[in-house]
Amino acid sequence: MKKVTLLLTAILFVTVAFGQKALRTTAFNNLRKGELDKAMQNIEPTILDASTMSDPKTWFYRGNIFLQIHMSENPDYKALDANALNKAYESYQQLLKLDTKKEFYTETIQNLFIISEQFYNEGVKNFTLDPPNYASAFAAFETSAKVNESYGNVDTLAMFNAALSAENAKDYSNAKLYYNKVKELNYPQPLIYNSLATIQLEEGDTTAAVAILIEGRKKYPDNFNLLIAETNIYLSSKQNDKAMANLVEAIKTDPENPTIHYAVGVNYALMGDVAEAEKAYLKAVELNADYFEANYNLGALYVNEAAQVIDSANKLPLSAVKEYDALKVQADDILKKSIPFLENASRLDPKDKSTLLSLKEIYTRLQMYEKMKEVNDKISALE
């Protein structure tokens, strides 16, 4: 009786095993006929059964089925599984672990290449949406890079785009991870250093930001953006000497760039060198008459200079009438120099209240009452 039971068990096991293999073959035939819904339905039980789950053929068929579902132009098949591309990738990964004889290796690598391209395209689509979905773009680009790694290929472009997407998503941990990866792989993109510096600044580490920019400038000595990024840090942290050294170098590189001349003006103003600041601002306005900041700062420079002259006049003794009058005329002349630049700034940005208030003060002092009334009306309209 015991032998009969064992024999029946063995027969049952063989029957079940054969049944699962037959189901797998049916799934393969469904795939060949383009019956993707039936193919998916028939292949899924085979990855759970002991008789077929360790067979590389099972995972090869499953990968092919889900890849075709993802690639299908038939909306009904496309809708069978929104995660079909990931399932295809996972299937081929499992296949590579089991396929010790490399029976399916060549076609699997070809299909993994297709999968990496599909994930890359998903990344581009999410990155360029309106509005962009940077988090999804990062996930897709990262997976594309990992798919490539799974068959020994290094896709630095996918890694770089993963970093860029993560940075835009403010996922700074992953952004730094992938920027550093492509940096170590010598990916030829100066933006890596600029972006890493920007992230360090966002995280409050100015020293690390400067260090990465210096490293980048050693690798790309002629890159203008890295030079300016480093200079901006020096300007914001009031390291005026270092900023000026960089700005002088920047002007040699791009002498017709109004932004650099403006930055030189800002730096000289911070250092208290009014004459050099004036020259730099004038050059910036000469190169770009519609440069709001250069117009405003030049006007403000004259206003501040006039205020210092008035302050000197007010400190004179009451008996120094002649000297007082001379300083008053000098201050008024300086204020008159500010008018065209502040008026131009107001034209460029009519809603800038600081410019309007400065003009109101100047018009009042110079007894230009009609213009003062016009400006006053503009200020009232903004309130």
Image: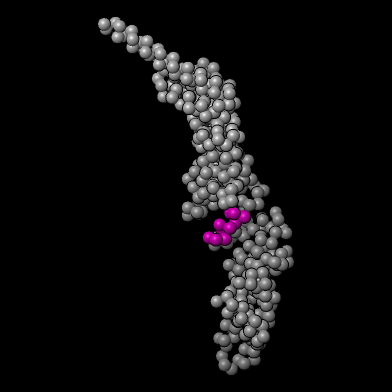
> On the image, which quarter does residue 19 sit in?
top left
Residue shown at the point (61%, 51%) measured from the top left: 226
Residue closer to the observer: 258 or 239: 258
User: From what the image shows, is residue 136 above or below residue 263?
Assistant: above
The N terminus, quarter of image: top left
Looking at the image, residue 56 sits to the left or right of residue 263; the answer is left
Count numbered badges in the picture.
0
Looking at the image, residue 88 sits to the left or right of residue 332; the answer is left
User: From what the image shows, is residue 236 above or below residue 313?
Assistant: above
**Residue 45 locus on image (x, y percent):** 43, 24
Q: Main secondary structure of the magenta part?
A: helix
What segment is highlighted magenta in the picture? 228-237
**Residue 253 locus on image (x, y percent):** 70, 54
Is 16 covered by the magenta stretch?
no
Residue shown at the point (35%, 10%) measured from the top left: 10
Residue shown at the point (65%, 52%) measured from the top left: 224
Looking at the image, residue 48 sits to the left or right of residue 215; the answer is left
Residue closer to the observer: 190 or 110: 110
The C terminus, quarter of image: bottom right
Residue closer to the observer: 142 or 152: 142
**Residue 364 locus on image (x, y percent):** 62, 85
User: From what the image shows, is residue 243 above or below residue 28?
Assistant: below
Q: Is residue 145 visible?
A: no
Is 234 covered by the magenta stretch?
yes
User: From what the image shows, is residue 269 above or below residue 120?
Assistant: below
**Residue 313 locus on image (x, y percent):** 59, 86
The coloring applied to the image is one colour
Farthest residue toward the left? 1
Q: Is residue 134 visible?
A: yes
Residue shown at the point (59%, 70%) measured from the top left: 272
